[in-house]
Structure formats: structure tokens, C-alpha cells
């Protein structure tokens, strides 16, 4: 599936000669649009610096100039390159959008990370170099949050095991398969914020929640789920697992359904029992799907925030904090954009390194298992 | 393969021995037991929320669970939202607020999903059909560029966007949220749509070009209609993710563009034991997606499992 299917095989040569006048027109158009963009940017910068007070209310003109430039760039492609340019038009919008909304803000973020900037104070930003990163290394709560991420990430293995079990159940010969599949999928549809209340704040509520009542009946006399660090961490993880297990399950189920029936049957004929057949045949064959599912799950796990923010706000004593929920509070409580961004940028670098290593390791591992 | 299959079938046909059939029964019981247990785990919180929205204080504190047996349902929770039969025709501030948040959620999630479908489908079609070279970047690199945006955690973008949107006067606007939400689902749309386009034979494009359609004509009139199931799957999945988004909305909206999750979150702390109204609000917030999940489950499964099977 990952092979570029027949990419570039529509090389039907279409005679599309481009007249010199048309080409010139295209170049002039793009040059004009670029001039407009650069000019607007320059004027806005001068305006902010107070050198040339044009009186802009905000930076919107620059945004509009970028839009005009993007359209001109597309037109330039078609005008000067004809058929080839029409092809470029497919990828250009998404690329320009991603540049403007993801790449530029991320780079801008690295700049903000070097500022001492309290948004709620009247004072503007001050450049303070690497000071934010230095104080980050002394911020015990941040490192604690990173450590918690380790726990949440390890819990993905448990989520994966449960999801695999459920996928096997759904793939067995059962009646009402559709009903069970829809029921198992439903938690995935729910907003984590609603789940925070539904489960964290009411089902698990100390006095009246059914989960607390059940725990009391089972002999835990003080079922305060969010009072002790480990119970709180596990309770948060349980809610997140509840919402996300369906996702892993659906991926694994698709993998199971694509597996040829003969393979497991052959293993049975060869005298393997169900357990052996699973470990010798099903599990190795499911390895590529499993790796995909776990990787995507890990990526989403690294963003975990909503449930923590709404149920425990990171408590007790930071025990349930994720990096995202911690930075959220850093901003909400101290309005310190510079410091918060510095923490986030460091986290981004960590994520990229971690995922690159994980990708390498899993690729190596699946190859060695399948050989 | 044929012979192996037939022997396998032949082995199963002889009447099962009693020992095997008892094992079979136990196996069945275990399978259905596990299925029902997990169904309970999945559905009970939803059941609990919906029933609690019809409870009064006594029912909450005494832990009543089954309506009409344990407790008499009443409209108190929904009344506090202005959505019960007796309040629905009266003027109600909570209802006005709820409806405006609901509208914001609909507009931002549908808008972002549509925009992501347009941008993502175009890019996915291009990457599936043509060879690009942009500097050192070939098709696979461009694809990776789009998909890798998935790893960007919201927290990395949230604070820079706070500053940028302030300067662009886009804070607390729906269009501002739409742009960000589009970004968060664009990688998924590109992923699903490229898979969809790759499954459509390229001969169809060639035939359309020979018939005199332009590249874009072939795409819009021939390929797009065939790719409709993928588009629907990508759209529904985007809708689920953007409808439930909380982090950006919490930081970037204040009053005008507040979405439903932000409203739910802001009420959780303040309600105390006033569970019925929180339950009604939560139930109303999850209802649209529960319906989508029940009715359009097929498409969600299709969207999620794209790329799982090679």
C-alpha cells in the first residue's frame, strides 16, 4: 500500500506550447504579488516600530497579502508551465496552508521561547536568551510531568493488549457482531471533556458515584480515586484508555479480517492449540498492523491533556500532570507565554527524537521477526 | 491450498465428541461473557449520564440507577438547560448560551472538516498520480511532510497562536478555530484520501484524458465521484476529532467563539452536587456524536482502519 501506485504513469504528452508573451505575463504577475507581500510586511514592521506610522489596526493586511500571493503563485504555475503547472496546483494549496499554519508558527514559537513575556502585564516582551531553558532545567514540576508521560506511554502496552483481546472477540464467530462493534466504538466518539465529568467527576465521585459505591462494597473503605498519586494516575489512564481503546481495536480488527483464514486453520490442522496458533501465526502476522496502531496511539498519547485538565488539574501534587496540562496551567496561572512556549518547544524536540528512535527500533524489530 | 481446505472441512464434519462439545459450550460462554462485560463497560457511563439527567437530589445521593423502578424521572436537569417540555417555550438564558455554543461547535467542526477535505483530497490526488520534485523533496518526502504534522502536539502551537491571533485580530473567532482545526485533521485526511485514490485504477484517468478532459476535469468529473466513500469516511472522522477538541478552544476563545467542550468544562467546577444539570449538558454535548457513531459506524471504521492493512 505504501508503494506509490503508478505515480507518474499518466505521462500522456499533451502539446501545450506556451507563448513568450504569456510566460512574461505570468512572471510579472508573480513579481507584482511578491512585491505586494514584501511591501506590506515592510510597512507593517515600520508601523509597529513607529518609524512610519501608517496606522494599521492589526496584522491582517499581511495575512491578506499572503493570500493574494498564494493565489498569484498558483496562477503563475499554470500560466508559465501550462499542463505541468496544473498538476502543481493539486499540492500547492495544502503546502501553502501547512507552511502558514504549522511551520511558521512553530518557528515563531522558537522565537517566543527566548522572550520573557507576560501577556497580562502592560510591559511588552523582553529578550532573555536561554534564560527560559535554564529555569526549565530547575523546574521540578516539568520533569515530573515528563516522568508521568513515561507512565502514560507504558500504559499503551496495556491498552494494546486489551484492544487485541477485543478485536479477537469481535473476529470470532459471534452473533450480533454489529451491535457489539458499535457499542465498543462508542467511547471513541465522546469528547474527553464530557468523559471527564461523566466518569471522573460523577461515576468516580467519592460520596455518591457508583464506582465509589462498588469499591466500598468490594472492601476499599475510602475510595477517593484522586487523592493518592498512584490511584489518581491509574484512574486518569483508565479514562483515557476507555476513550482510545476502540481506535486500536478497530485497526487490529481490520488486520485480523484481512488475514487469510487458511493460515490459522492450517496451524490448527498441524496440531497447534488456540494459544499456540495465536503466538506462532496470528501475532507475528499482525505485527505490522500492531506497530502502526501502537505508533499512532503513542502520537496521540503524547498530546494527552483534556482529561487531566478537567478532572485533577494535574493533582495531587502534580502526580497526574502531563506536559500539555502542565504548560496549560503555566500559561493560565502565570500568563507567561515565553516560559510556556519554551517548555513546549523542548517537548517538541523530545518528541521528534523519541519518535525517530521508536520508528527505527520498530522497523528493525519487525524486520528481524518476520525474517 | 484446495486440498488443505477440504481436509480441514472434512475434519470438522464428524459429529463432535461429548468432551469437545462441553469445551465448545464453555468457550461460547466465555466469549459472550467477555463481550457483554465490555459492552457494559462501554455503555454504562453513557447510560449513567442520560439517566442522571432525569434525577433529583435524592436519587443522586441514594445512588438510584434504574428509572421507574428506583426513581421517578423528572425534567429538572433539562429544565435547568431550558430544554425540558415546560421551559422550551419560555425565554431561557442557559438555553441561549447552550445553543450558541452548539452552533459554534457545528460551524467550526463542519467548516474545518470541509476545508481539510478540500485541501487534503487535492494534495492526496496529486501525490497519488503525479511525480513532484520540489528541491530535494520527492513525492514520499512531501507525503511525509504532510503526515508528520500529526505529531505536533497542540501545546506547541497553542501559545504561538495566542500571540499571532492577538495580532491578527483572530482571537475568539470561529474562523481562527477553523484554521487550526483544519491543520489538526489535514494529515489524517491526506492519509485516508491517498489510500483511496491509490485504489482507483489509473486507467480511468488516462481514459478521461484521452476523451479530452483536462487534468482537473478528469479529477473532478471522473475520480472524485468514485472516491466518495473515502471522502465521507475522512469527513466523519474529522468531524469527530474537531467536535471534541478542547485544548485550542480553551486557550483561544473567550466568549464569542466558545465551543461546547469549553462550556462543559467551565460548568464542571461550579455545579457542586447539582448533577442533573451537568448530566443534561454532557448528554446534550455527546448526543450528536453518539448518533453519528450508531448510524455511520461503517464510515468511521473505514476511516480509522485505512492503512492498517497492507
Image: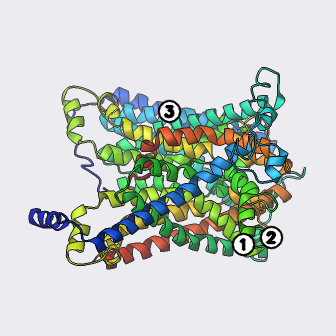
* Proximity of marks 2 and 1: CB atoms separated by less than 8 Å: yes
Q: Chain of mark 3?
A: A
Residue that appears at 36% across and 26% down: A21
Between the C-alphas of marks 2 and 1, the distance is 7 Å
Of residues A113 and B242, the one drawn nearer to the viewer in this rendering: B242
Q: In which quadrant is the N terminus of chain A drawn?
A: bottom left
The nearer-to-camera label among 3 and 1 is: 1
Mark 2 Cα shell of 10 Å, populated few (<14), some (14-19), many (≥20): some
Q: Is residue A42 visible?
A: no
* Image quarter of residue A280: bottom left
Q: Is residue B277 left or right of residue A163?
A: right
Residue that appears at 84% across and 50% down: B273
Q: Chain of mark 2?
A: A
Q: Is residue A225 left or right of residue B7?
A: right
Q: Which residue is mark 1?
A: A231
* Image quarter of residue A66: top right
Q: Regarding mark 3 in the picture, which secondary structure is present there?
A: helix
**Residue A64 in the image, given as x and y percentages of width and height:** 62, 33
Instruction: Determine whether B163 is above or below A53 in the image.
Output: below
Q: Is residue A242 left or right of residue A278?
A: right
Q: In which quadrant is the C terminus of chain A drawn?
A: bottom left
Q: Residue furthest left?
A: B3
Q: Which residue is mark 2?
A: A227
**Residue A14 in the image, given as x and y percentages of width and height:** 22, 33
* Image quarter of residue A43: top right
Instruction: Determine whether B16 is above or below A12 in the image.
Output: below
Q: Which residue is mark 3?
A: A71
Q: Chain of mark 1?
A: A
Amino acid at each position: 500500500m505504501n508503494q506509490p501506485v503508478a505515480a507518474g504513469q499518466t505521462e500522456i504528452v499533451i502539446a501545450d506550447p506556451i507563448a513568450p508573451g504569456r510566460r512574461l505575463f505570468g512572471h510579472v504577475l508573480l513579481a507584482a504579488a511578491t512585491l505586494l507581500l514584501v511591501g506590506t510586511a515592510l510597512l507593517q514592521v515600520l508601523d509597529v516600530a513607529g518609524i512610519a506610522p501608517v496606522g494599521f489596526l492589526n496584522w491582517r493586511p499581511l495575512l491578506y497579502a499572503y493570500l493574494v500571493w498564494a493565489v498569484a503563485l498558483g496562477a503563475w504555475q499554470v500560466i508559465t508551465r501550462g499542463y505541468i503547472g496544473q498538476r502543481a496546483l493539486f499540492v500547492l494549496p495544502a503546502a501553502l496552508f501547512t507552511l502558514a499554519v504549522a511551520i511558521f508558527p512553530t518557528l515563531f514559537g522558537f522565537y517566543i521561547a527566548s522572550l520573557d513575556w507576560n501577556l497580562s502585564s502592560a510591559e511588552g516582551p523582553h529578550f532573555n536568551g536561554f534564560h527560559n531553558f535554564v529555569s526549565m532545567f530547575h523546574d521540578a514540576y516539568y520533569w515530573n510531568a515528563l516522568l508521568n508521560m513515561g507512565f502514560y506511554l507504558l500504559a499503551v502496552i496495556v491498552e494494546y493488549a486489551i484492544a487485541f483481546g477485543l478485536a479477537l472477540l469481535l473476529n470470532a464467530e459471534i452473533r450480533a457482531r454489529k451491535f457489539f462493534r458499535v457499542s465498543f466504538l462508542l467511547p471513541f466518539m465522546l469528547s474527553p471533556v464530557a468523559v471527564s465529568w461523566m466518569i471522573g467527576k460523577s461515576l468516580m465521585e467519592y460520596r455518591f458515584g457508583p464506582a465509589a459505591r462498588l469499591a466500598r462494597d468490594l472492601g476499599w473503605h475510602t475510595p477517593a480515586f484522586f487523592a493518592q498519586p498512584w490511584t489518581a494516575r491509574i484512574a486518569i489512564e483508565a479514562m483515557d484508555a476507555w476513550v482510545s481503546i476502540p481506535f486500536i481495536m478497530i485497526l487490529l480488527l481490520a488486520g485480523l479480517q484481512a488475514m487469510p483464514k487458511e493460515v490459522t486453520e492450517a496451524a490448527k490442522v498441524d496440531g497447534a492449540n488456540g494459544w499456540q496458533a495465536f503466538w506462532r501465526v496470528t501475532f507475528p502476522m499482525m505485527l505490522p498492523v500492531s506497530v502502526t496502531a501502537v505508533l499512532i496511539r503513542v502520537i496521540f498519547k503524547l498530546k494527552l491533556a483534556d482529561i487531566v485538565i478537567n478532572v485533577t488539574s494535574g493533582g495531587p501534587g502534580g502526580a497526574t500532570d502531563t506536559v500539555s496540562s502542565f504548560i496549560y496551567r503555566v500559561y493560565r496561572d502565570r500568563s507567561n507565554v515565553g516560559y510556556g512556549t519554551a517548555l513546549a518547544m523542548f517537548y517538541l524536540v523530545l518528541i521528534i527524537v523519541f519518535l525517530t528512535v521508536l520508528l527505527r527500533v520498530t522497523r528493525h524489530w519487525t524486520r528481524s521477526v518476520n525474517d | 491450498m484446495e486440498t488443505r481446505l477440504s481436509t480441514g472441512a472434512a475434519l470438522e464434519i464428524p459429529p463432535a465428541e461429548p468432551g469437545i462439545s462441553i469445551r465448545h459450550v464453555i468457550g461460547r460462554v466465555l466469549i459472550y461473557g467477555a463481550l457483554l462485560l465490555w459492552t457494559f463497560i462501554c455503555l454504562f457511563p453513557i447510560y449513567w449520564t442520560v439517566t442522571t439527567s432525569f434525577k433529583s437530589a435524592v436519587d443522586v445521593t441514594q445512588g438510584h440507577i434504574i428509572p421507574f423502578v428506583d426513581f421517578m424521572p423528572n425534567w429538572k436537569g433539562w429544565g435547568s438547560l431550558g430544554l425540558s417540555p415546560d421551559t422550551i417555550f419560555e425565554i431561557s438564558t442557559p438555553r441561549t448560551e447552550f445553543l450558541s455554543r452548539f452552533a459554534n461547535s457545528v460551524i467550526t467542526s463542519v467548516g474545518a472538516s470541509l476545508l481539510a477535505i478540500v485541501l487534503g483530497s487535492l494534495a492526496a490526488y496529486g501525490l497519488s498520480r503525479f511525480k513532484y520534485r520540489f528541491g530535494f523533496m520527492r513525492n514520499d518526502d512531501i507525503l511525509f511532510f504532510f503526515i508528520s504534522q500529526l505529531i505536533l502536539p497542540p501545546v506547541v502551537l497553542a501559545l504561538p497562536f495566542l500571540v499571532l491571533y492577538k495580532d491578527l485580530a483572530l482571537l475568539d473567532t470561529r474562523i481562527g478555530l477553523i484554521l487550526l482545526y483544519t491543520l489538526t485533521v489535514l494529515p489524517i485526511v491526506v492519509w485516508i484520501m491517498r489510500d483511496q485514490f491509490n485504489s482507483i485504477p489509473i486507467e480511468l484517468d488516462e481514459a478521461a484524458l484521452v476523451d479530452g478532459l483536462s487534468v482537473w476535469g478528469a479529477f473532478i468529473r471522473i475520480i472524485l465521484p468514485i472516491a466518495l466513500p473515502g471522502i465521507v469516511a475522512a469527513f466523519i472522522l474529522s468531524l469527530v476529532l474537531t467536535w471534541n477538541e478542547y485544548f485550542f478552544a480553551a486557550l483561544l476563545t473567550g466568549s464569542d467563539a466558545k465551543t461546547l467542550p469549553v462550556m462543559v468544562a467551565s460548568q464542571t467546577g461550579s455545579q457542586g452536587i447539582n448533577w442533573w444539570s451537568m448530566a443534561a449538558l454532557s448528554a446534550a454535548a455527546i448526543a450528536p456524536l453518539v448518533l453519528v457513531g450508531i448510524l455511520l459506524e461503517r464510515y468511521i471504521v473505514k476511516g480509522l482502519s485505512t492503512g492498517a492493512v497492507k
